[in-house]
């Protein structure tokens, strides 16, 4: 009876502590939101300068984040830092929705006058200090926006653009009032330091690997957004990543690097440590085998099979970059024809035309949280501009381009936001936003089960009189966990990332032979029209899309196999550095 009473007492105590923590968080939320709302209302009603009008749009974003970054090599920690981060971001426009200071490249070189960091945001929930940080920012950005607006008006008068080139600068939305609760996110620093040591220590015994690293990066944030349009949202942004990278040189000096990437919404959703260790050992075995693999022949043009993660990496690189399924527009330049390159996506002119095989359908399903019991790191409920995306957005329907991912900046043919302004954590430690996918699902109509997919591919190759074709299981992709040596070794091909898991398939026997030193000669987006076969079975690939120092979690659900009937490969042409004369001292101690 006494023990029961004690247990009841402890349980009640735990409930009380949790309730206190929840109450404290609720009070913190209220202080932050009130400070943002009060300061934005004050500025939107009072901010003016001489003859100029006040801003017509003002949005405040506040990010309360917690990060953990661990780096280890050969069983020893090189970095371990747990950091609270708070940032403010002000987006202000003068003019109106049709014509404002944004989408302009002038003397200051930016597309819009938003910004953060003028004054450090307090880590405490200090109402007055939070308001002061936003006040300083707002004043600075308003003055910059006025300068840009005047300069843009002057530029437009000089450039005399046609009516067909004109479009609104910002789209209207229905204001959103939404609170999204985030998953439980546990920062267990000692545990993950141990994981980093143990996994990185596996490479200590491999003297053929010249350098290696294990990088763990966790980020858990709450994003607050308040705008004068009436939008008030609070939503989570969380991601847990683990990268394993290895580097070596072949006997002829060719630099070789390979990687493993794990990405999940929370640390507890990463694979079990035993699986990560087994994968790391497999990575070591593969890179050693690659060192001794025969060099690719001079050239090849014919069927190429993509399987596994290579399918997702291919789609990420070719379909979701600035020339892919992401909308962009040509900005107004202060000086016309000044040799500056615009960022208009020319694929937009292909709307309602075929850009892929008529068997391929590609959808954005941003709110999907899991697929086949695998958590999706790219899932989100509301974007960085407070726009709630549709549950499903068809981008490519049976090969026909239907629309592009967009934020609130209209383009000629995609005039409204479909909720894909993603909040992202920069490598400098602050949050910003960029147009990017969240969860993408690609399906192949009439696809075969993987059990018969390969057999059918080889049969067709034999029918066409081919003795061998090529299979790609992995593309080399740069990632934030790489050191400089690995990063430059991965930058080989402008057409498409280098295939590092490249195999020559014997058509008659199905035997695979690993080869190295090949790159793609050319791989335009029109190559997707030449997909001739795909698998029915799908796989999940959680990854980080990295560009210009920004990292955004994305999930791809793709066919496990695709066949392109005509792809060109050629032998890599690089200056091969000489092998190191003295072995790694750590490995030499054995």
Image: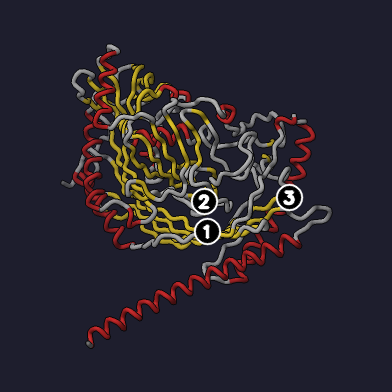
Location of residue 363 in the rendering, given as x and y in whole percent from the top left corner: 46, 38
Q: Of all residues shown, which one is farthest toward the bottom?
A: 2
Compared to residue 16, the image places residue 311 above or below, namely above
- Identify the element where label 3 is drawn: loop
Label 3 – label 1 distance at C-alpha: 25 Å
Question: Left or right: where does residue 471 sit relative to residue 386?
Answer: left
Labels 3 & 2 near each other (Cβ < 8 A) = no
| 444, 213: nearer the viewer | 444
Question: Left or right: where does residue 295 sit relative to residue 229?
Answer: left
| Residue at 59% over, 27% down | 349
Task: Report which residue position mark 3 lands on.
Answer: 94
Location of residue 168 in the rendering, given as x and y in whole percent from the top left corner: 70, 40
For mark 2, does the 10 Å Cα neighbourhood hold few (<14), some (14 to 19), or many (20 or more) residues? many
- Identify the element where label 1 is drawn: strand
Residue 281 can be seen in this image: yes
Q: Of all residues shown, which one is farthest toward the front?
A: 446
Q: Of all residues shown, which one is farthest toward the top?
A: 465
Location of residue 52 in the rendering, given as x and y in whole percent from the top left corner: 80, 52
- Identify the element where label 2 is drawn: strand
Query: In which image quadrant can residue 562 be found?
Result: top left
Location of residue 20 in the rendering, given as x and y in whole percent from the top left corner: 44, 77
| 384, 570: nearer the viewer | 384
Compared to residue 455, the image places residue 375 above or below, namely below
For mark 3, does the 10 Å Cα neighbourhood hold few (<14), some (14 to 19), or many (20 or more) residues? many
Label 3 – label 2 distance at C-alpha: 23 Å
Specify the label residue 423 is tagged with.
2
Question: Left or right: where does residue 141 sit relative to residue 242?
Answer: right
- Classify the position of the N terminus by image quarter: bottom left
Compared to residue 296, the image places residue 19 above or below, namely below
Question: Left or right: where does residue 215 sit relative to residue 179?
Answer: left
- Work out whether mark 3 precedes mark 1 in sequence or the reverse, and give the earlier one: 3
Specify the label residue 223 is tagged with.
1
């Amino acid at each position: 009876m006494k023990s029961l009473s004690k247990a009841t007492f402890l349980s009640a105590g735990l409930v009380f502590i949790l309730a206190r923590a929840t109450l404290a968080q609720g009070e913190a939320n209220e202080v932050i939101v009130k400070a943002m709302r009060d300061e934005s209302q004050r500025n939107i009603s009072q901010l003016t300068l001489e003859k100029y009008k006040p801003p017509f749009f003002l949005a405040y974003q506040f990010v309360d984040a917690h990060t953990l970054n661990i780096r280890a090599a050969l069983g020893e920690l090189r970095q371990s830092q747990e950091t609270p981060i708070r940032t403010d971001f002000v987006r202000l426009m003068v003019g109106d929705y049709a014509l404002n200071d944004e989408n302009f490249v002038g003397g200051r070189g930016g597309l819009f006058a938003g910004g953060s960091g003028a004054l450090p945001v307090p880590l405490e929930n200090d109402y007055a200090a939070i308001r002061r940080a936003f006040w300083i920012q707002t004043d600075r950005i308003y003055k910059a926006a006025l300068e840009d607006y005047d300069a843009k008006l002057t530029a437009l008068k000089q450039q005399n653009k046609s009516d067909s080139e004109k479009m609104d600068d910002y789209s209207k939305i229905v204001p959103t009032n939404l609170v999204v609760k985030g998953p439980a996110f546990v920062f267990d620093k000692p545990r993950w330091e141990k994981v980093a040591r143990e996994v990185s220590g596996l490479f200590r015994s491999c003297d053929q690997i010249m350098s290696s690293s294990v990088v763990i990066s966790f980020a858990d944030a709450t994003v607050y957004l308040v705008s004068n349009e009436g939008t008030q949202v609070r939503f989570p942004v969380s991601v847990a990543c683990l990268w394993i990278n290895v580097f070596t040189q072949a006997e002829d000096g060719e630099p070789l690097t390979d990687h493993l990437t794990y990405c999940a919404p929370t640390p507890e959703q990463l694979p079990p440590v035993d699986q990560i260790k087994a994968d790391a050992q497999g990575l070591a075995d593969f890179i050693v085998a690659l060192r001794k693999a025969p060099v690719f022949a001079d050239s090849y043009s014919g069927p190429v099979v993509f399987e596994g993660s290579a399918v997702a990496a291919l789609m990420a690189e070719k379909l979701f970059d600035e020339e892919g399924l992401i909308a962009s527009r040509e900005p107004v330049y202060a000086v016309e024809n000044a040799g500056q390159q615009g960022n208009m996506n020319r694929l937009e002119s292909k709307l309602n035309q075929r850009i892929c095989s008529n068997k391929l359908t590609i959808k954005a399903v941003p709110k999907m949280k899991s697929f086949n019991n695998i958590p999706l790191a790219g899932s989100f409920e509301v974007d960085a501009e407070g726009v709630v995306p549709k549950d499903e957005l068809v981008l490519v329907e049976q090969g026909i381009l239907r629309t592009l991912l967009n934020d609130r900046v209209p383009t000629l043919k995609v005039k409204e936001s479909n909720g894909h302004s993603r909040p992202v954590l920069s490598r400098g430690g602050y949050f910003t936003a960029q147009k990017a996918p969240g969860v993408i699902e690609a399906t192949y109509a009439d696809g075969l089960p993987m059990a018969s997919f390969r057999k059918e591919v080889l049969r067709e190759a034999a029918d066409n009189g081919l003795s061998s074709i090529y299979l790609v299981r992995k593309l080399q992709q740069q990632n934030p966990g790489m050191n400089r040596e690995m990063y430059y070794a991965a930058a080989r091909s402008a057409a498409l990332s280098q295939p590092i898991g490249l195999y020559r398939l014997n058509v008659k026997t199905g035997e695979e032979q690993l080869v190295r030193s090949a790159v793609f000669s050319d791989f335009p987006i029109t190559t997707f029209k030449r997909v001739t076969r795909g698998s029915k079975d799908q796989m999940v690939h959680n990854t980080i899309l990295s560009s210009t120092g920004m990292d955004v979690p994305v999930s791809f659900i793709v066919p496990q196999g695709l066949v392109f009937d005509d792809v060109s490969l050629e032998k890599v042409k690089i200056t091969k550095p000489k092998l190191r004369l003295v072995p790694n001292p750590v490995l030499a101690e054995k």
